[in-house]
Image (cartoon, rainbow, N blue to C red):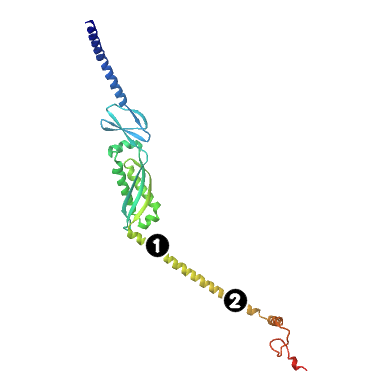
């Protein structure tokens, strides 16, 4: 009996202790939940948008540790680092050629204005804002140039697209960092026309160079003829009696060098030989 009474008393004391301790345990758990839910850490490269009972608050949380009201406030992280959007945009040039432009765009959200962007657009801003803005900017600028100018004035076209797109994105609290037009694609017909034009220009250039070469060669012949005529004129002016006598003497010397030692039977030429057989 005594043992049973002891057990019963212990059970009653345990129940009393549990009843007394349980509220403290529950309070501790609730406090831990509140403490855990009241702390938020905004990671590097992001900003925190504060929602209070669903309403966007004007405060934007920077990177680091912050406190919020548990179960009342919610913090939504938004990436503000540089992002990339790339697309192919088809537009008509000023001379009505269809041009497909491949463009890559680097942009980022304005950190202090992400709450307004979230309130007006949401987090699907790339599909709702960026892609349409790129297409509109490319079409607006492409229409100002001919297809040939799009290639020859590529840097100017790129600068205008960047200026137009930056203005559009700034309206939605986004900043444009850089754009890169990687390629212009034209229709097959236009590419063939360009190729034929280049062939015609090359042929025209070759013909022009040939004409220039012929003209130079003709001028060279004229100059050579003038030089030869002038040389003959100078030679005629320099012919004197002394020169004639010198040429005769040189001819006689060449004849003597060729003589084999036999006297000719007949006199002739410039050498005064006589027939010895007739001298008796």
Name above or below for residue 268 compared with residue 222. Answer: below
Q: Position of residue 250 (x, y in %)?
A: 70, 80
- In the picture, residue 265 is in which quadrant? bottom right
Mark drawn on residue 156: none
Q: Determine the secondary structure under disc 1.
A: helix
The residue singled out by tag 2 in the image is 230
Q: Residues within 10 Å of mark 2 (few under 14, many from 20)?
A: few
Q: Position of residue 278 (x, y in %)?
A: 75, 94
- In the picture, residue 176 is in which quadrant? top left
**Side (left or right) of 194 relative to 120:** right
Q: Position of residue 65 (x, y in %)?
A: 36, 29
**Side (left or right) of 203 relative to 35:** right
Residue appearing at x 42%, y 66% in the figure: 203
The residue singled out by tag 1 in the image is 198
- Tell which of 140 and 100 is nearer to you: 100
Q: Residues within 10 Å of mark 1 (few under 14, many from 20)?
A: few
**Side (left or right) of 20 relative to 197:** left
Residue appearing at x 34%, y 34% in the figure: 47
């Amino acid at each position: 009996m005594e043992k049973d009474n002891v057990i019963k008393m212990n059970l009653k004391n345990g129940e009393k202790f549990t009843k007394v301790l349980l509220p403290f345990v529950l309070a501790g758990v609730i406090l831990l939940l509140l403490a855990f839910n009241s702390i938020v850490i905004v990671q590097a490269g992001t900003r925190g948008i504060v929602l209070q009972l669903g309403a966007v608050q004007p405060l934007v949380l920077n990177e680091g540790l912050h406190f919020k009201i548990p179960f009342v406030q919610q913090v939504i992280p938004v990436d503000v680092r540089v992002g990339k959007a790339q697309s192919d945009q088809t537009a008509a040039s000023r001379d009505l050629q269809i041009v497909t432009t491949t463009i890559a765009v680097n942009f980022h959200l304005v950190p202090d204005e992400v709450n307004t962007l979230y309130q007006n657009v949401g987090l699907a801003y790339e599909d709702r804002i960026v892609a349409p803005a790129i297409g509109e900017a490319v079409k607006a600028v492409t229409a100002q140039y001919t297809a040939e100018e799009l290639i020859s004035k590529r840097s100017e076209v790129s600068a205008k697209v960047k200026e137009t797109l930056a203005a559009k994105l700034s309206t939605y609290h986004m900043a444009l960092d850089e754009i890169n037009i990687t390629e212009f694609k034209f229709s097959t017909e236009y590419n063939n026309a360009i190729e034929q034009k280049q062939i015609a220009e090359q042929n025209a250039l070759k013909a022009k160079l040939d004409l220039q070469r012929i003209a130079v060669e003709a001028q060279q012949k004229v100059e050579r003829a003038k030089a030869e005529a002038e040389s003959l004129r100078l030679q005629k002016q320099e012919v004197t009696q002394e020169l004639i006598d010198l040429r005769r003497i040189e001819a006689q010397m060449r004849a003597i060098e060729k003589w084999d030692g036999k006297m000719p039977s007949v006199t002739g030429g410039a050498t005064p030989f006589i027939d010895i057989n007739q001298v008796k």
